[in-house]
Amino acid sequence: MKRLSVPAAELHVLDRGAGLPLVLLHAFPLDHSMWSAQIERFASQYRVIAPDLRGFGTSSVTAGTVTMEQLADDVAAILDGLGVTEPVVLAGLSMGGYAAFQFFRKYPQRLRALVLSNTRAAADTAEARQGRLKTIDQVLTIGAGPVAEAMLPRFFTTESFERLPGVVEFVRERILLTAPEGIAAALRGLAERPDVTGLLPEIKLPTLVVAGADDAITPAGEMRTMAAAIAGSELVVLPGAGHLSALETPVEFNTALARFLRKLEA
Ligand code: MLT
């Protein structure tokens, strides 16, 4: 992992391999290690860059609100710090996808392609926002435990719970290791993130949309509608996957991503 200074934070970033840069942005409240299967698969052919986003993993925690725009600015600063000047393939899962939309809005010239996985363009509903505010109170008073217990059944399908107990435990541990202040700051940013539906028709880049057939957080139907609004995008719905598709069905996820990346280089 490399340690990079960005405005008001130190971020840890995995930077492995050479070739077309593939930047992987993790979900909330995880860290770069959720991409292990993708890092292993793609670092022999591409330059894989996977940060612990601000507030997560071993990166610094900043108080207050960490907006999706802040995360996008951090990614730009990371690329500067690593000396990456060529356009990158930016892949984001869920919160990583929200940050990818903001990166597209602010830094379109730095993008070669987008991968939007288990994410959505819409803002939070009023109810979802209320839920996040309640979670902030909980996490700051009793810690990350209740967040883990509430999120795990929504992250994974029932079958994944039975089939992949080690993966579920791994994700539970990542959540429990995350600083409550980091979780709270990101929750504030998630709650106030803008609706980017109007941005979708402006995406003219090659775009892969990956959905989990049984995703309880960002349902496949909603992702299908999102993909339809991005002209020329490719939609892959992964059977047997819930919200954390890259972890639940890594082989199928990687197959779809490999095919997409190969086409970019053709
Ligand atoms: C995530 O997986 O990043 C979160 O579920 C995003 C969200 O809560 O909206």
Image (cartoon, rainbow, N blue to C red):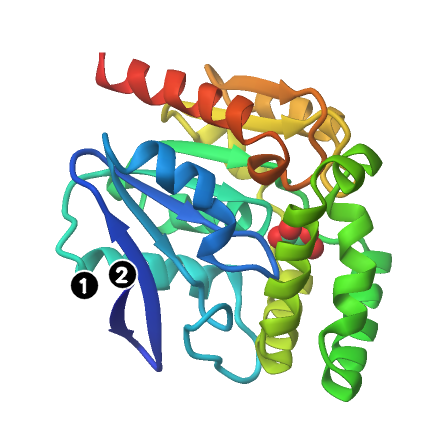
Residue 113, x across and y down, in percent: 34, 30
Residue 38, x across and y down, in percent: 42, 37
Q: How many marks?
A: 2
Mark 1: amino acid:
Gly
Query: Which image quadrant is residue 14 in?
Result: bottom left
- How crowded is the residue under tag 2: few (<14 C-alpha within 10 Å), some, or many (20+)? many
Instruction: Report which residue position mark 2 lands on.
Output: 78
Residue at 62% x, 56% y: name it: 170
Circles 2 and 1: CB atoms closer than 8 Å: yes
Residue at 76% x, 67% y: name it: 147
Spatial separation of the CA atoms under disc 2 and disc 1: 5 Å
Mark 2: amino acid:
Ile
Above or below: residue 254 compared with residue 186: above
| Cβ of mark 1 under 8 A from ligand 1 | no
User: Relative to the observer, which residue lies in front, 65 or 89?
Assistant: 89
Q: Secondary structure at mark 2?
A: helix
| Residue 81: mark in rendering | 1
Above or below: residue 87 compared with residue 186: above
Residue 111, x across and y down, in percent: 29, 38
Looking at the image, the residue that sits furthest to the right is: 127
Residue 265 seen by the camera: yes
- How crowded is the residue under tag 1: few (<14 C-alpha within 10 Å), some, or many (20+)? few
Above or below: residue 135 compared with residue 263: below
Q: Secondary structure at mark 1?
A: helix
